[in-house]
């Protein structure tokens, strides 16, 4: 085989393993070293310094498709393996897509009132490579769940809908519970935001000009004034962002979502929640 002949030719000087590493993209099977080159080459240090990070699915599990059907709208989920308690809880989850132009997709914050630090959303993936979720607990420990995904071109893919129509719907929000709200029990909720979430890389197919970046930057959700979930998001979030999260209603009250984008536009929606078991 051609690869074997190259390996034999260079083995004396470089070593066959090194040659195979160089040829891995040709073979279509990147090595672990190559997969994590961006992470170990500076991304990890930039965000976490020398803090120890345990790579394990014992605290959180990141789930993503092996191969994305649409690289611009890739569904992923993060599932916590521990409950949120006052004694110990998942405080923050950092989501990275190593090969994206902006690797930090978002930083998501939780509290004991979240009930569960579970999260589901849709992201853009620019090239084959790792997706990783780094969870920080309330006592300062860091844990990583990592998956490799096959997808290309998601960051520069044209918007999936007519931009003028998308701008006309800008800021419309739907907030709902995905399950029956029960008193003092974690309840799944979903926040849907109508927003083109332009990242500055999409080209207009008619004018061949790039639409300026304009995307959701901050999300904050409260229940009766107490924060239960918040996020700072970047260019890796898909258009029309959707976030699924949990909260614990300890009484009847209002679930409120506030969204701010990069142009300073603010959007707000509320939902009255009456948990089963509430005395009225």
Image: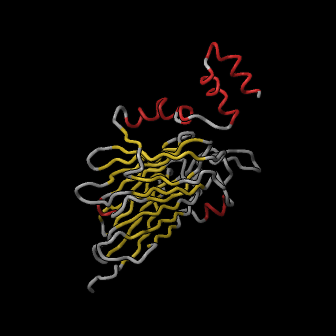
Task: State the residue at coordinates (50%, 47%).
Answer: 105
The quarter of the rendered structure image containing the N terminus is: top right
Q: Looking at the image, is 174 positioned above or below residue 67?
A: below
The spot of residue 79 in percent (x, y) is 43, 58
The spot of residue 131 in percent (x, y) is 52, 45
Way the structure is coloured: secondary structure
Q: Looking at the image, is 162 positioned above or below residue 204?
A: below
Q: Looking at the image, is 2 positioned above or below residue 47?
A: above
On the image, which quarter does residue 270 sit in?
bottom left
Q: Nearer the viewer, residue 29 or 255?
A: 29
Task: State the residue at coordinates (28%, 50%).
Answer: 138
Q: Nearer the viewer, residue 226 or 3?
A: 3
Q: How many marks?
A: 0
Q: Is residue 273 left or right of residue 193?
A: left
Task: State the residue at coordinates (30%, 60%).
Answer: 84
Q: Nearer the viewer, residue 170 or 129?
A: 129
Q: Residue furthest left?
A: 87
On the image, which quarter does residue 100 sit in?
top right
Q: Looking at the image, is 175 positioned above or below residue 72?
A: below
The spot of residue 4 in percent (x, y) is 72, 25
The spot of residue 18 in percent (x, y) is 60, 23
Q: Nearer the viewer, residue 261 or 175?
A: 175
The quarter of the rendered structure image containing the C terminus is: bottom left
Q: Residue furthest bottom?
A: 280
Q: Is residue 264 left or right of residue 13?
A: left
Q: Is residue 151 left or right of residue 263?
A: right
């Amino acid at each position: 085989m051609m690869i074997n002949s190259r390996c034999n030719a260079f083995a004396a000087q470089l070593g066959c393993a090194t040659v195979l590493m160089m040829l891995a993209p040709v073979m279509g099977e990147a090595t672990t070293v190559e997969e994590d080159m961006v992470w170990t080459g500076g991304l990890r240090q930039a965000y976490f310094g020398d803090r120890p990070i345990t790579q394990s699915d014992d605290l959180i599990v990141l789930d993503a498709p092996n191969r994305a059907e649409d690289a611009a709208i890739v569904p992923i989920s993060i599932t916590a393996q521990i409950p949120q308690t006052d004694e110990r809880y998942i405080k923050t989850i950092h989501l990275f897509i190593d090969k994206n132009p902006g690797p930090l997709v978002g930083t998501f914050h939780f509290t004991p009132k979240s009930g569960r630090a579970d999260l589901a959303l849709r992201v853009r993936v620019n090239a084959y490579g790792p997706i990783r979720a780094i969870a920080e607990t309330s006592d300062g420990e860091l844990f990583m769940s990592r998956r490799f995904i096959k997808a290309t071109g998601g960051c520069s893919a044209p918007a999936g809908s007519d931009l003028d129509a998308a701008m006309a719907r800008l800021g419309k929000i739907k907030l709902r519970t995905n399950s029956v709200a029960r008193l003092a029990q974690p309840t799944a909720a979903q926040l849907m935001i109508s927003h083109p979430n332009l990242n500055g890389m999409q080209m207009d197919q008619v004018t061949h000009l790039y639409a300026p970046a304009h995307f959701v930057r901050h999300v904050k959700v409260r229940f009766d004034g107490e924060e239960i979930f918040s996020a700072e998001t970047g260019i890796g979030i898909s258009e029309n962002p959707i976030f699924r999260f949990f909260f614990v209603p300890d009484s009847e009250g209002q679930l409120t979502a506030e969204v701010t984008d990069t142009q300073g536009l603010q959007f707000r929606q509320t939902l009255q929640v009456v948990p089963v078991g509430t005395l009225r």
